[in-house]
């Protein structure tokens, strides 16, 4: 199905099942431990692989001595990076995962030790001796930014944009701001580590793994192994979180495949927790310079956002200026992104890449600007709202209700009672509130699905879409149930298998909207097949309560299909609507923090998110996405930072004891409001993404609340107490 | 983790003997620290002696008014003990500020005292670390040192002792009771139990080879207000950046031990004499010899401010 005209009324609009708060259908499997995750799959005769990571950040391996490991108890094989030699790299990978003598980053996989038990493999892995020729690397972004370059492209967008004459407008603006903000390297820190079980049958490989994007993994694994993609069967039905860390093929899959080949047995490999930080990817640090000029009445006349980030050679930018191209009006504007070469582990997508760190900076700058203008920060944002793409005014937003979010949020939160910075105190707590706007683009990716109606009237949906904890199973079942007029228990959903049609996958908050649209398209075809089988007149047919009705005739769906069932498959494809219209999701975050007047510890006391992101397919799963994202935003604001050792080139705090994500005690009451809206330009579901919007802006709202509480303006994340202490009042 | 043999000790004496007979042996209590370190091959014992079944898990008053805490009393049980909560509230508060409920259910008094540093370089066997591998160098010096020591550190090591319980015990003047392999008993004042790193950061306590902790005794209750204030980046489940354990008497005199700043609980009796004058006066003596790194300079200010808050809380 080509989606090329805005959606009109369709069966989804009935909202008998879609849009309802239906608990996740895989919930019981998960809470009772019956959902089987990658490392838990069982095969006969499994052997266990344990990775060995490079001990240096950059250089070459001159020799490896595996004799002690090979002779250790229970060891079946040691496969080294030298044994397998240089491999062709997967399209989505920047750094090599395995193969060859070159070391590109710390903890890069250089061997896998395979043994009868996990413990034997781990013990023997420590016995592999490696000699390196170490080379000097560049690990400090603040140094490397001086030699940063303009890359050819920034994730499909131009690295630079300019409209009007920014310099002149900024120069003459009566009120202006110029500040630099920084965000550190951040880790996905999902609960389930990367893990794979590989089994070869002749030249065919079956891989159980934990992947957000089945087809990307399968394609890149085939490239890396040097085999035909059709020879790989990849399964990833349950995933314990990803946040972008499982978008691209990772070393566990490659190591398991090579190891299983070597020992001719099924082999399991999980990455140990420290490897998640230095072996896989992370969100790269940014240095961001923002300049804003405005009239005294608060009208923005000039806005500029520049960002520097680093990555491995041929790597990617953190596209931190993207939201600034769209969020506020202003006639004169420019954005620019520069990429420095660094030899830290590969930087790559983490939840809301670009917008999350970009808004961490921009939304502090907006707060600062409002303060300079003597305007309320909510008012200042509303004043500079735009209904068109400010860089291309001929492009309207498909639907934009940022103003609605801000107003609704302000009312709900009690914003009007906010005081001046440093004026509210309860006991030893300085109290402040903060606001930030949220914007995250709505991305559209083709997505296919197959639906089959069986003799008993049960519909089974198959698509390689993944459920990374987000609720995909449930919203897909809701979509099929709504389309086919069936109750939820007559729909089965099978996901995460490369034998199913290729879906959007889970990433960029495109999964829910695109994968359900693919299911919608397949169901439209299945409805046609049913109608044809029954010889009904298509225009009059209604699917409801398990029956198909046309005029006075009503037939139960059970029985329509013969023993072979009725099948239909389709792909949703996206046409120019995304060129003619800017599609984005919007929100507003309000938070209240307390800062301990003595110690500078900041604790969040209240959070509210108001989200405008089209039709909400299921308020429970959507809310759960948003509160999870808000929680992540607390971590990014207050504690999360991968500490770089700039001498040795690695992230030092590579475990969950030292990379501090929020714990329950850090998270107060969280409230989420969804604006009641639909976006017919986005998709037939009239929905948009929600999973990343919830993170966008949260951290800046916290930073702004800290300023309101203390009068101290922090511009460098995370906002730990050491950065605040100097600005707090002396204690008597 | 290396392969190891395992033994369930039959008595305190046999446990100590067995440990002395094998220099690669280790006692195991709750295992919450030791097993993590073994998995990463930071500790590589070849023999484990389980000391859980030796009847060391009671809390009993002594005839002279002290309180004797068995070495295997779980942190949860110790923190919730009625006598402890009434007479040694400081200890109870320090315990519940540490780790998580699950860990405290498993962790023991002896194991907690002996928990090892959380220096991240100590945890990465690819990195030089004098504590893990004597003579290899100290990666934290000139590296990531935000949580490291500001007091009593050396050129060889700037790690901190990370625990909470021992800070409270230091303020309470606890005594560590041990049995040596040859059967002799020792009472080691907590002040002498943990060592500064000096040139031998791998030697962390006064314990000798094979010496087993049997109990910790607390002197008779001293009254006063018991306050344990732990400062950290997140609200729970994090080690202290700085912690202050204080017992403050109605006249403003008192005792203060500080955690998160040194290789041992930090207490300076001369500083306590200044307490009635306020935090600044006391802190200036407590921190007189501070030698922070650029990354942990804030701790000096933080100790003073936290102490200030504690004294204010004590005044009510
Ligand atoms: C995630 C995490 C967070 C934590 N957070 C905190 C925190 O915030 N604050 C805090 O204070 N602690 C914290 N801890 C540390 C925790 O308190 C310790 O792991 C625990 O107290 C150790 O006790 P255990 O009985 O498990 O010791 P074990 O691990 O069994 O043993 C530790 C050491 O003591 C030795 N030992 C044990 N018994 C004896 C004995 N009778 N005689 C001589 N030697 C003995 C062992 O040989 C070993 O060297 C944390 C731990 C973890 C894993
Ligand atoms: S501070 Fe101590 S524990 Fe840390 S690296 Fe240096 S020697 Fe090792």
Image (cartoon, rainbow, N blue to C red):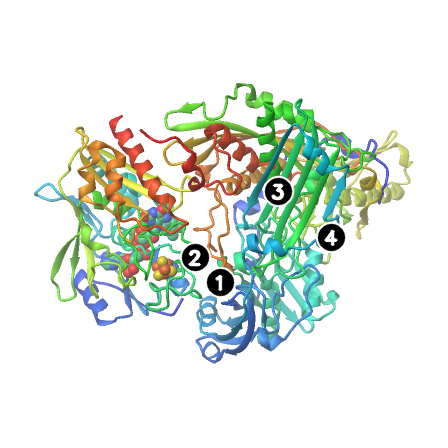
Q: Looking at mark 2, is its residue's CB closer than 8 Å to ligand 2?
A: yes
Write down the chain letter for disc 3. Answer: A
Q: Which residue is under mark 3?
A: A289
Mark 4 surroundings: few (<14), some (14-19) or many (≥20) residues within 10 A: few
Task: Name the secondary structure under disc 1.
Answer: loop
Task: Name the secondary structure under disc 2.
Answer: loop
Q: Name the residue at 43% across, 57% down.
A: B143
Task: Name the secondary structure under disc 3.
Answer: strand
Q: Which residue is under mark 4?
A: A153
Question: Picture coordinates of residue B315 (x, y %)?
Answer: 25, 27
Res. A630 image quadrant: top right
Q: Looking at mark 1, is its residue's CB closer than 8 Å to ligand 2?
A: no
- C-alpha distance separating marks 2 and 1: 9 Å
Residue A627 in sight from this viewpoint:
no
Nearer the observer, disc 2 or disc 3?
3
Compared across the picture, whether A55 is left or right of A494 comes to left
Q: Are marks 2 and 4 on the same chain?
A: no
Residue furthest left in the image: B64
> Is B147 rendered above or below residue B198?
above
Res. A268 image quadrant: bottom right
Question: Picture coordinates of residue A158 (x, y %)?
Answer: 75, 48
Mark 3 surroundings: few (<14), some (14-19) or many (≥20) residues within 10 A: many
Q: Are marks 2 and 1 on the same chain?
A: no
The answer to whether mark 2 and mark 1 are in CB contact below 8 A is yes
Question: Picture coordinates of residue B155 (x, y %)?
Answer: 32, 60
Mark 1 surroundings: few (<14), some (14-19) or many (≥20) residues within 10 A: many
């Amino acid at each position: 199905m080509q989606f090329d005209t805005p959606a009109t009324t369709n069966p989804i609009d009935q909202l008998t099942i879609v849009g309802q708060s239906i608990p996740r259908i895989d919930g019981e499997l998960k809470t009772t431990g019956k959902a089987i995750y990658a490392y838990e799959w069982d095969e006969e005769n499994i052997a266990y692989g344990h990775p060995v990571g490079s001990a240096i950040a950059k250089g070459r391996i001159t020799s490896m001595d595996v004799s002690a490991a090979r002779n250790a108890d229970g060891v079946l094989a040691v496969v080294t990076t030298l044994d397998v030699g240089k491999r062709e790299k997967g399209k989505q990978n920047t750094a090599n995962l395995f193969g060859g003598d070159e070391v590109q980053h710390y903890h890069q996989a250089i061997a896998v030790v395979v043994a009868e038990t996990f413990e034997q493999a781990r013990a023997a892995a420590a016995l592999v001796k490696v000699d390196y020729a170490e080379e000097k690397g560049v690990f400090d972004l603040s140094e490397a930014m001086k030699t940063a370059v303009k890359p050819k492209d920034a994730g499909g967008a131009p690295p630079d944009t300019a409209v009007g004459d920014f310099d002149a407008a900024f120069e003459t603006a009566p009120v202006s701001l110029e500040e630099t903000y920084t965000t550190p390297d951040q880790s996905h820190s999902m609960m389930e580590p990367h893990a794979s079980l590989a089994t070869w049958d002749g030249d065919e490989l079956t891989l159980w793994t934990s992947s957000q994007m089945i087809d990307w993994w399968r394609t890149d694994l085939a490239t890396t192994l040097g085999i035909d993609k059709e020879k790989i069967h990849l399964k990833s039905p349950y995933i314990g979180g990803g946040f972008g860390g499982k978008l691209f093929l990772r070393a566990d899959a490659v190591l398991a495949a090579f190891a299983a080949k070597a020992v001719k047995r099924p082999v399991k490999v999980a990455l140990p927790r420290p490897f998640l930080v230095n072996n896989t990817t992370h969100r790269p640090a940014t240095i961001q310079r923002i300049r804003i000029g405005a009239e005294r009445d608060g009208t923005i006349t000039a806005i500029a956002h520049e960002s520097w980030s680093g990555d491995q050679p041929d790597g990617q930018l953190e596209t931190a200026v993207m939201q600034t191209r769209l969020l506020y009006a202003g006639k004169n504007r420019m954005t620019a992104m520069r990429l420095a070469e660094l030899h830290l582990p590969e930087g790559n997508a983490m939840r809301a890449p670009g917008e999350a760190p970009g808004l961490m900076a921009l939304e502090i700058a907006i707060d600062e600007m409002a303060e300079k203008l003597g305007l309320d920060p909510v008012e200042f944002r509303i004043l500079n709202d735009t209904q068109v793409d400010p860089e291309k005014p001929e492009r309207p937003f498909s639907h934009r209700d940022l103003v609605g979010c801000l107003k609704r949020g302000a009312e709900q939160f009690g914003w009007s009672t906010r005081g001046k910075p440093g004026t509210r105190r309860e006991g030893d707590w300085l109290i402040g509130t903060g606001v930030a706007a949220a914007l995250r683009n709505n991305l559209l990716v083709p997505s296919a699905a197959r639906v089959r109606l069986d003799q008993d009237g049960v519909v089974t949906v198959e698509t390689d879409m993944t459920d990374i904890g987000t609720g995909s199973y449930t919203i897909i079942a809701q979509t099929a149930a709504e389309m086919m007029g069936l109750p939820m228990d007559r729909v089965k959903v099978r996901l995460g298998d490369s034998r199913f049609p290729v879906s959007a996958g889970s990433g960029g908050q495109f999964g829910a909207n695109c994968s359900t649209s693919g299911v919608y398209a397949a169901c439209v075809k299945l409805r046609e097949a049913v109608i044809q089988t029954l010889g009904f007149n298509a225009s009059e047919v209604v699917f409801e309560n398990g029956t198909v009705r046309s005029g006075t005739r009503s037939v139960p769906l059970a029985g329509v299909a013969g023993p072979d069932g009725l099948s239909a498959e389709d792909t949703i494809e996206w046409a120019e609507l995304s060129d003619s219209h800017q599609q984005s999701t919007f929100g507003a975050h309000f938070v209240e923090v307390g800062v301990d007047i003595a110690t500078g510890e900041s604790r969040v006391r209240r959070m509210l998110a108001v989200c405008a992101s089209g039709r909400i397919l299921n308020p429970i799963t959507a809310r759960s996405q948003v509160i999870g994202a808000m929680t992540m935003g607390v971590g990014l604001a207050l504690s999360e930072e991968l500490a770089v050792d700039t001498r040795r080139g690695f992230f030092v705090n590579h475990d969950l004891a030292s990379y501090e994500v929020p714990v329950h005690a850090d998270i107060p009451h969280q409230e989420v409001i969804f604006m009641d809206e639909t976006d017919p330009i986005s998709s037939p579901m009239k929905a948009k993404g929600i999973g990343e919007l919830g993170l966008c802006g949260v951290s800046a709202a916290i930073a702004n609340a800290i300023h309101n509480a203390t009068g101290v303006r922090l511009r460098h994340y995370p906002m730990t107490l050491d950065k605040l202490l100097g600005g707090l009042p002396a204690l008597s | 983790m290396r392969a190891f043999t395992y033994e369930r000790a039959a008595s305190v004496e046999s446990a100590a003997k067995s440990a002395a007979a094998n220099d690669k042996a280790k006692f195991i209590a709750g295992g919450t620290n030791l097993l993590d370190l073994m998995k990463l091959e930071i500790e590589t014992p070849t023999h484990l002696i389980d000391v859980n079944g030796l009847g060391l898990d009671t809390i009993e008053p002594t005839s002279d008014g002290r309180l004797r805490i068995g070495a295997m009393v779980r942190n949860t049980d110790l923190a919730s003990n009625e006598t402890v909560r009434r007479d040694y509230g400081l200890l109870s508060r320090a315990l519940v500020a540490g780790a998580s409920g699950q860990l405290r259910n498993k962790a023991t008094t002896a194991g907690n005292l002996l928990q090892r540093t959380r220096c991240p370089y100590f945890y990465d066997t690819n990195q030089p670390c004098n504590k893990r591998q004597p003579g290899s160098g100290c990666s934290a010096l000139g590296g990531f040192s935000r949580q490291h020591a500001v007091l009593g550190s050396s050129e060889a090591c700037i790690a901190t002792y990370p625990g909470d319980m021992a800070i409270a015990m230091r303020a309470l003047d606890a005594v560590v009771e041990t049995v040596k392999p040859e059967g002799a008993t020792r009472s080691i004042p907590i002040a002498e139990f943990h060592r500064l790193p000096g040139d031998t950061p791998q030697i962390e306590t006064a314990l000798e080879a094979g010496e087993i902790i049997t109990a910790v005794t607390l002197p008779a209750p001293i009254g006063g207000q018991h306050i344990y204030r732990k400062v950290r980046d997140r609200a729970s489940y994090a080690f202290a950046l700085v912690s202050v354990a204080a017992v403050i008497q109605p006249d403003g005199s008192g005792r203060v031990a500080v955690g998160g700043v040194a290789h041992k609980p930090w207490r300076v009796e001369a500083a306590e004499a200044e307490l009635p004058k306020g935090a600044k006066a006391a802190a200036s003596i407590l921190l007189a010899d501070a030698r922070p790194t650029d990354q942990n300079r804030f701790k000096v200010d933080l100790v003073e401010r936290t102490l200030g808050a504690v004294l204010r809380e004590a005044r009510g």
